[in-house]
Image: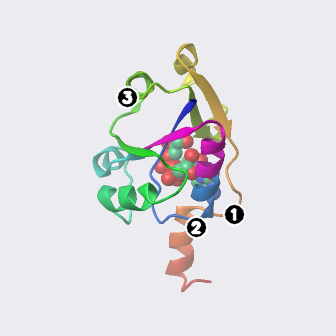
């Protein structure tokens, strides 16, 4: 049983999110998704359209997802890996050039998955603001 963990806000769910969750799950047998809380996002200067409980409800309904936990800080990753007995942490490749999460490699595998081109929550918001064009 290989257990995989990934992180994100997952606001205004789109196929980029579905594809990364599908590929993350395919790395193992059990997928834990840590969803950024509203407070954690506020600390980053970000505000999601849907609140944490709504984003959690939506992500929990995805067939690839076995467990949703809150992401409340940058520092919790090692605790999460230990607590949920994680074998692989999968991140979007927006982080691929960074050594920020290298410390996790002593405890699990660290995998960067390519993002889906041409779609993002930010683009959805901008397009809707232009009347969907
Ligand atoms: N994603 C993707 N393709 C897109 C958009 C997003 O593969 N077109 C991935 C991101 O790389 C991330 C996940 O979907 O792994 C969730 O995306 P966001 O909610 O935008 O995540 P964010 O709040 O930016 O945090 O890599 C972890 C980061 O902390 C993600």
Tag on residue 123?
A: 2
SS at circle 3: helix
Asked if the magenta segment contains residue 26, the reply would be: yes
Screen quadrant of the C terminus: bottom right
Who is closer to the viewer here, 30 or 121? 30
* Percent x, y of residue 92: 61, 43
- Image check: 113 left or right of 48? right
Tag on residue 118?
A: 1
In primary-sequence order, the first of circles 3 and 2 is: 3
Q: Residue at x 69, y 63 (%)?
A: 118
Specify the segment rendered in magenta.
20-34
Callout 1 crowding tier (Cα within 10 Å): few <14, some 14–19, many ≥20: few
Outermost residue on the top side: it is 106
* Percent x, y of residue 31: 52, 41
* Percent x, y of residue 11: 45, 60
Closer to viewer: mark 3 or mark 1: 3
Mark 1 lies within 8 Å of ligand 1 (Cβ measured):
yes
Please report contact status of discs 1 and 2: CB closer than 8 Å, yes or no: yes
Q: Residue at x 50, y 79 (%)?
A: 129
Callout 3 crowding tier (Cα within 10 Å): few <14, some 14–19, many ≥20: few
Closer to viewer: mark 3 or mark 2: 3
In primary-sequence order, the first of circles 1 and 2 is: 1
Q: Residue at x 36, y 64 (%)?
A: 50
Residue 47 shows in this picture:
no
SS at circle 2: helix
Callout 2 crowding tier (Cα within 10 Å): few <14, some 14–19, many ≥20: few
| Residue tagged 3 | 76
Q: Is residue 4 above or below residue 115?
A: above
Asked if the magenta segment contains residue 67, the reply would be: no
């Amino acid at each position: 049983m290989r257990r995989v963990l990934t992180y994100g806000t997952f606001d205004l769910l789109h196929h980029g999110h579905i594809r990364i969750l599908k590929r993350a799950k395919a790395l193992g047998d059990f997928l834990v998704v840590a969803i950024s809380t509203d407070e954690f996002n506020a600390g980053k200067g970000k505000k999601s359209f849907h609140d944490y409980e709504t984003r959690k409800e939506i992500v929990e309904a995805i067939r690839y997802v076995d467990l949703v936990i809150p992401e409340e800080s940058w520092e919790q990753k090692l605790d999460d890996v230990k607590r949920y007995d994680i074998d692989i942490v999968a991140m979007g490749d927006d982080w691929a050039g960074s050594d920020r999460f290298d410390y996790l490699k002593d405890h699990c595998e660290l995998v960067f998955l390519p993002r889906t081109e041409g779609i993002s929550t930010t683009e959805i918001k901008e397009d809707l603001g232009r009347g969907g064009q």
